[in-house]
Amino acid sequence: MVRKFFVGGNWKCNGTAEEVKKIVTVLNEAEVPSEDVEFGIVILFEPHVTACNPSCDLGSLNLMHRLLFFFGSEVVVSPPFVFLPMVKGLLRPDFQVAAQNCWVRRGGAFTGEISAEMLLNVGIPWVILGHSERRSLLNESNEFVGDKVAYALSLGLKVIACIGETLQQRESGSTMAVVAAQTKAIAAKVSYWDNVVLAYEPVWAIGTGKVATPVQAQEVHLELRKWLHDNVGAEVAVSTRIIYGGSVTGANCKELAGQPDVDGFLVGGASLKPEFIDIIKSATVKRQQ
């Protein structure tokens, strides 16, 4: 069973053509561990034994898996729509490109929207859906996000599906209820999870300088994996990559990456800076576990 470390860079609504070219140059010149080198451990799943935390129960799993991690990372950067073709043309071949959104169905009279078909037509393999900024600013509901994820997947796009709670929700103790409801809306429409990366991004940590502690991140990621096991299936729970987003930097990435159920990052502001390379390299922490 393979969970390759995943690092996404969400450039949001930032950059000029010249600035974007400079960012791509930094990425192209960076020396990062080869994604082709892997290591693994064999884990026997029994009651009260899990791949992610031996002290946590995912249920009675009588399966033998070889859980592999890669020294390197799968890297996907997401520039604004207008720069997608340019970045795709200039970017090194071992890194990929994602759009920051796409429409919920086939194109038509939807002014300002970009369809999944359009992304595929210009060779874009990934899309970010359900980001908290779209949920809050554009009132995208859980169900709407679920529909968007399902439609994008049905056409062959790979999806970074975002979930996360607000500060008020965390302080009220409803974090897991919120992220479970968001995940449930996706699971209700999706049966094939191989092309889904689940991004847990606590809203209170996005762009605020605040960051979930490694313990907080691991707690939510582990509970999400348990939810997937109980509601989707054991194989999906083990194989789905759950990444963390929310003020990830070169300074805190290694400690976060060291958590057993943190399979990578979705990075905002730091993905526009040279420290993004340090975040990519944090995949090597998995080798030491």
Image (cartoon, helix red, strand yellow):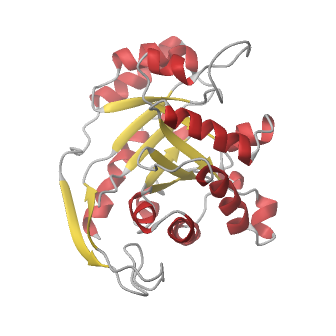
- Say which quarter of the image contains residue 274: top left
| x then y, percent, for residue 85 | 45, 14
Q: Residue at x 44, y 15 (%)?
A: 122
In which quadrant is the C terminus drawn? bottom left
Q: Residue at x 42, y 78 (%)?
A: 53
Q: Is residue 103 visible?
A: yes
**For this rendering, which residue is in front, 178 or 155?**
155
In which quadrant is the N terminus drawn? bottom left
| x then y, percent, for residue 231 | 57, 66
Residue 237 vertical position relative to residue 72 in the rendered view, above or below? below
Q: Is residue 21 left or right of residue 117?
A: left
Q: Is residue 21 visible?
A: no
Residue 32 vertical position relative to residue 288 in the rendered view, above or below? above
| x then y, percent, for residue 162 | 60, 47
Q: Is residue 280 left or right of residue 17?
A: left
Q: Residue at x 22, y 71 (%)?
A: 41
**For this rendering, which residue is in front, 252 or 109?**
109
| x then y, percent, for residue 202 | 66, 56
Q: Residue at x 48, y 78 (%)?
A: 58
Residue 222 vertical position relative to residue 74 in the rendered view, above or below? below
